[in-house]
Amino acid sequence: MMKKNGFTLAEVLITLAIIGVVATLTLPALMTNTQEQQARTALKKGINTLTEAAQMNSAIAGFDYGSFNETSTNNTESQSLYGLLANRTTIDYQLTGTTTNQAKAVNNGASNYVMFFRDGSAIAFKNDATTLVTNAKVNKMQSDGLVYGISVIYDTNGAKGPNLLSNCSGNAGMLNNAAQNDTTTDCTVKARRVIKDQFGVRLRGGFAVPNGAAARWAFDN
């Protein structure tokens, strides 16, 4: 008589339990890695889009991020950040920040302005003259000789979560230059898993550049 070889029910259950434990331990890390990679890819695409928009607008309309003369008022003819982006990118809709605003791409402040792009990303900025006009001028220099520019938040997936700023310092100040311009090393950025779905971006003249160690690491890797 031939002896049948097979797994007992107990052996099958033990095997399934082991597989379940391994999956529980590895899947969260895999998901996090995938989400971080998606965010980094989206940041690079967003910075390229913002740079191309400024350079195209400079060639067509004669102004870029360094030559605004007014804040954003939903006027596509204005020489403003809204006017530039509305004419050179695909804008879905925009919202001003209020305490009841559900656009969580940026903290709810009365002076905040959020523009949502049709690819699902968003850009948020303080809609005031100091941020958009005075600091934007190409002759407004920092101590390192770089143009100060406009500090904005680029949200890689718009209103979708987690809506957290990629920030080495742990400071949640969405539009706080000091919080974004930290000097934490690149290896710390990777080790602490600080890459989320939002990044600091600086608009300088005809260029958009990553702002802060976390954004710079995500852009370069």
Image (cartoon, rainbow, N blue to C red):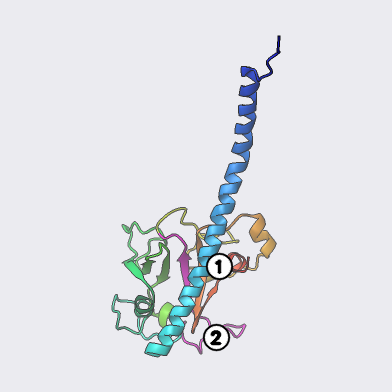
Q: Is residue 22 magenta?
A: no
> Amino acid type of disc 2?
Met
> Amino acid type of disc 1?
Gln
In the depicted structure, whether residue 160 falls above or below residue 116 = above
- Please name the residue that numbered disc 1 is placed on: 180
Q: Quadrant of the N terminus?
A: top right
Question: 112 or 161, which lies in front?
Answer: 161
Q: Residue at x 47, y 64 (%)?
A: 174
Determine whether the residue tagged by mark 2 lies in a helix, strand or loop.
loop
Total number of numbered discs in the rendering: 2
Determine whether the residue tagged by mark 1 lies in a helix, strand or loop.
helix
Tell me residue 209's x, y (percent): 54, 75
| Residue span colored magenta | 136-158
In the depicted structure, whether residue 108 falls above or below residue 133 = above
Q: Are the residues flagged by discs 1 and 2 in contact, CB closer than 8 Å?
A: no
Quarter residue 158 falls in: bottom left
Lower sequence index among marks 1 and 2: 2
Q: Is residue 145 magenta?
A: yes
**Magenta highlight: main SS:** loop
- Please name the residue that numbered disc 2 is placed on: 141
